[in-house]
Image (tube, rainbow, N blue to C red):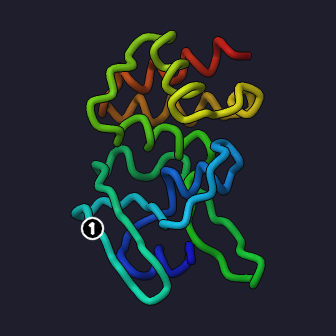
C-alpha cells in the first residue's frame, strides 16, 4: 500500500499517522495511508483503500525522508520517525503547543506516544525542519520537548 501511495500522486512520501504507526510511535493501527506532497492536498479512494495527501512547502519537504523496504521486496519513500512527528506537528490545525510543556502534552497525551520511543527520535532532523522556516515556533518546541525527555 505505501508504494501505491507514492505512485498514485507524486511527488509524495508516506508520513503522518500511517508512518507514526509503522514506526511504533503511536499505539493505534492506521488503515488510511497518509502522505505528504508539494502538490495540492488530495484524497484518493481506490479499490485498494483510502489515500490522503497533505501539502507542505518545498523547503520543508525533503529533510528526513528515507527509502523503506516492504516485505515483498519493493521500496517506497517514507518519513523517518522524526520527520513524521514534524509533519504531524506542522499539519495539525490550530495546534497551540508552542511551549515545551504544551508540546509534551500534545505528544504524550493527545497522540499517546510512549516517552521511551521519543527518546530515540533524531533531534537533528527536527532541527533541519525548523530551519526550513515554516511553523518554526512549533518545531522548536517539538525539538526542546524531545530533548527534555532524554
Task: Give SS at disc 1.
Answer: strand
Which residue ends up furthest to the bottom in the rendered image? Answer: 47
From the viewer's side, name the closer residue of 21 and 61: 21
Which residue ends up furthest to the left in the rendered image? Answer: 40
From the viewer's side, name the closer residue of 55 and 1: 1
Structural crowding at the residue carrying mark 1, measured as other residues with C-alpha within 10 Å and reported as few (<14), some (14–19) or many (≥20): some
From the viewer's side, name the closer residue of 30 and 54: 30
Using the image, determine if residue 147 lies above or below residue 88.
Answer: above
Residue 119: x percent and y percent?
A: 73, 26
Residue at point 54%, 66% (across, down): 31
From the viewer's side, name the closer residue of 61 and 42: 42
Q: Quadrant of residue 118?
A: top right
- Left or right side of 53 for 17: right
Using the image, determine if residue 121 lies above or below residue 136.
Answer: below
Residue 22: x percent and y percent?
A: 66, 56
- Left or right side of 106 for 76: right
Using the image, determine if residue 103 lies above or below residue 15.
Answer: above
Q: Quadrant of residue 115?
A: top right
Residue 121: x percent and y percent?
A: 67, 34
Quadrant of image for the N terminus? bottom right
Residue at point 34%, 42% (across, down): 91
What residue is disc 1 on?
42
| Number of marks present in the image shown | 1
Residue at point 48%, 34% (across, down): 128
Quadrant of image for the C terminus? top right
Q: Quadrant of residue 46?
A: bottom left
- Left or right side of 100 for 37: left
Amino acid at each position: 500500500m505505501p508504494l501505491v501511495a507514492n505512485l498514485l500522486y507524486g511527488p509524495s512520501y508516506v508520513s503522518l499517522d500511517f508512518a507514526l504507526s509503522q514506526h511504533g510511535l503511536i499505539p493505534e493501527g492506521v488503515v488510511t495511508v497518509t502522505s505528504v506532497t508539494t502538490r495540492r492536498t488530495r484524497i484518493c479512494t481506490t479499490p485498494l483503500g483510502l489515500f490522503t495527501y497533505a501539502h507542505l512547502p518545498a523547503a520543508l519537504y525533503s529533510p528526513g525522508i528515507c527509502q523503506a523496504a516492504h516485505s515483498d521486496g519493493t521500496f517506497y519513500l517514507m518519513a523517518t520517525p522524526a520527520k513524521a512527528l514534524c509533519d504531524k506537528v506542522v499539519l495539525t490545525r490550530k495546534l497551540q503547543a508552542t511551549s515545551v510543556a504544551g508540546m509534551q502534552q500534545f505528544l504524550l497525551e493527545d497522540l499517546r506516544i510512549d516517552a521511551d520511543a521519543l527518546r530515540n527520535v533524531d533531534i537533528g532532523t527536527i532541527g533541519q525542519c525548523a530551519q526550513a522556516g515554516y511553523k518554526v515556533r512549533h518545531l522548536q518546541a517539538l525539538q526542546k520537548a524531545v530533548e527534555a525527555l532524554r
